[in-house]
Amino acid sequence: MKVILNQDVGNLGEEGDVLDVSDGYARNYLLPNGLVLQHTKSNLAMIEGRRARIEQKKAAKRENAETLKERLEGESLTISMMAGENGKLFGSVTSATICDELAKAGIDVERKRIDVPDHSLKTVGNFKVRVRLYGENEATLTVSVVPSGEAAPAAPAEKPTEKRDDTPDESDATEMPAKSVAESAGDDATVPAVEDGAVQESVASEADDVVEESVAVDEETEEEVDA
């Protein structure tokens, strides 16, 4: 079926283009969605009435393509990927990968317009990637694939804590308990000594009392005998 594109349609063409498509594709998808018009004289006349506006849109597309080309070729795209010692990637860089990285840089390019050599990049290095722009215009993008995931540098060793003058060393810590025990023992030994002296003095006092009582009894006995 011959149709007229009513707007830009990916993989088909631009607004105003006349082309042939399968009947099923036209009836089941293109016509119901308003993407195309049937090829008739009236529809051709309508499209010709829009021709000036269509050409203005094409001119703007060409200008944008030139600007994008300068930007793509003016700087390289660096992509970090995990890689082995031989430079082989643990994975691959595809057109989708490049499309996502360009989007991060604020560059909008359709993935289908990015032609990666051998469909994917599987090693580290610098590569030339073709980017198809508007019409016959295209750009060559330099893609640098670098290894990532290197081990982080070791943290500097901590400096030993300086010993403070008022901090006792191990020998002091060992001597201190012994000295403390000795002082405690000395204090404890002094107390019983005083108590023992008091006991001895009390016992001596009681002995004197007993002697005096004994003497008194003897004197009373003598007096009774004399009487």
Image (spheres, rainbow, N blue to C red):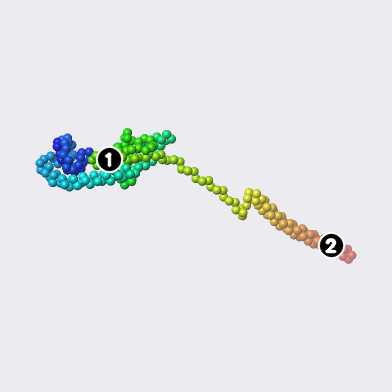
Mark 2 vs mark 1, foreground winner is 1
Q: Helix, strand, or loop for circle 2?
A: helix
Q: Quadrant of residue 206?
A: bottom right
Q: Quadrant of residue 149?
A: top left
Measured from the top left, where is residue 8 in percent x and y?
20, 43
Viewer-nearest residue: 36 or 70 = 70
Q: Which residue sits at x=80%, y=61%?
A: 208
**Tag 2: residue type?**
Val
Q: Which residue sits at x=75%, y=58%?
A: 197
Which residue in the structure is indicated by mark 2? 215
Q: Is residue 86 left or right of residue 213?
A: left
Q: Which residue sits at x=41%, y=40%?
A: 148
Q: Helix, strand, or loop for circle 1?
A: strand
> Quick one: label 1, few (<14), some, or many (20+) residues within 10 Å?
some
Q: Is residue 107 left or right of residue 12?
A: right
Q: Residue furthest left?
A: 41
Q: Is residue 169 visible?
A: yes
- The tag on residue 138 is 1
Q: Mark 2 or mark 1: name the one nearer the start of the chain.
A: 1
Q: Which residue sits at x=65%, y=49%?
A: 171
> Quick one: label 2, few (<14), some, or many (20+) residues within 10 Å?
few
In the picture, the quarter occupied by the N terminus is top left
Q: CA distance from mark 2 to mark 1?
A: 144 Å
In the image, residue 220 above or below residue 139: below
Measured from the top left, where is residue 224 in percent x and y?
87, 64
In the picture, the quarter occupied by the C terminus is bottom right
Q: Is residue 31 visible?
A: no
**Tag 1: residue type?**
Glu
Measured from the top left, where is residue 54 in percent x and y?
18, 45
